Amino acid sequence: MEITVGHTPDADDAFMFYGMATGKVRSRLAVKHVVEDIETLNKKALRHELDVTAVSAHALGYLDDYVILKSGGSFGLDYGPIVISKKKMDAAELCRATIAIPGKLTSANLLLMLAIGRFEAAEMSFEAIPDAVESGRAGAGLVIHEAQITYDRKKFVKVFDLGSWWASNNTGLPVPLGINVASTRSMDSQTIEDFSELFTRSIAYGLDNVGEAVDYAMQYGRGQPKETITKFVKMYVNDLTLDMGQKGREAIARMFELAREKRLIEKEVKIKVV
């Protein structure tokens, strides 16, 4: 049986899919990989275009007929997306700035709204954000992926750290960023369970063979050196990636609880994990 699986052109996703994509980990399922940026995958999920896909945890607030896979989640452990600018800004100045964001459905966008309230956003590709800030088209930029650790400190100042903000307000819970979901419209429960088990084994294989898995992930390294990609992968592929467990569930639920309190999301989100 062939299923379509969406994931991003990012090193951490490539690392997780290494075992599966290279045949090191096998299954009865034939997987067709669809590689797109996270906001594109969020929108594909809204339209049920894929059987399984990575999505922002935020997107779950707008999805129906999906279950969350226990594996493959991206959770920050006291770190997460950051906001950069060309100059220092206090909270009041940041609220008044036009902030470049990598997509309205990204978890980074929701987390920033939870932290500072609604703001004027300029939506664009995550790769274009530093240039938009440097050129002055945006007063600040919300940075995700490896740019969180590789942004040019000669050009930009970190003016807000969402990982630190979350940790100070939600003690003990990781920062919920990305998850993987399976469509209950296109797959039966046994197929979903079989893919979930395959995905878990693929991630475990990568963690057991870090060097070769990082070598594979380097095709999505966007020109960064191996040591940087290794650092980034180790930040976002951890024990919670193998199984989000109770803490992962609680973190997602807490994010949506806060979003409903602030009237940023109306839907009551059910956290169903397989």
Image (spheres, helix red, strand yellow):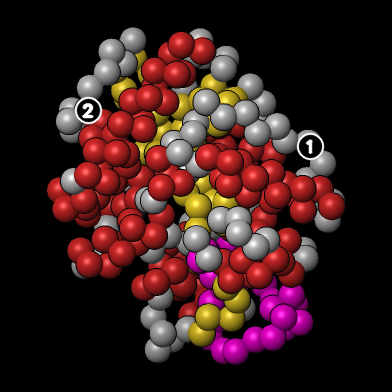
| Up-down relation of residue 195 to residue 83 (above or below) | above
Magenta-colored span: 79-101
As helix, strand or loop, the secondary structure at mark 2 comes to: loop
Residue 55 visible in the shown view? no
Quadrant housing the N terminus: top left
- In this rendering, which labeled residue sits more in front, label 2 or label 1? 2
Residue indicated by mark 1:
267
Viewer-nearest residue: 50 or 201: 201
Q: Position of residue 218 (x, y in %)?
A: 22, 54
Q: Does residue 216 appear to the left or right of 64 in the view shown? A: left
Residue type beneath disc 2: Val
Residue 96 shown in magenta = yes
Quadrant in the picture for residue 93: bottom right
What is the total number of numbered labels drawn onto the structure image? 2
Residue indicated by mark 2:
25
> Residue at (40%, 40%) from the top-left corner?
242
> Residue at (64%, 38%) from the top-left corner?
60
| Up-down relation of residue 115 to residue 249 (above or below) | below
Viewer-nearest residue: 20 or 206: 206
> Residue at (41%, 47%) from the top-left corner?
239
Q: Position of residue 27 (x, y in %)?
A: 27, 18
Question: Which is more N-terminal, label 1 or label 2?
Answer: 2
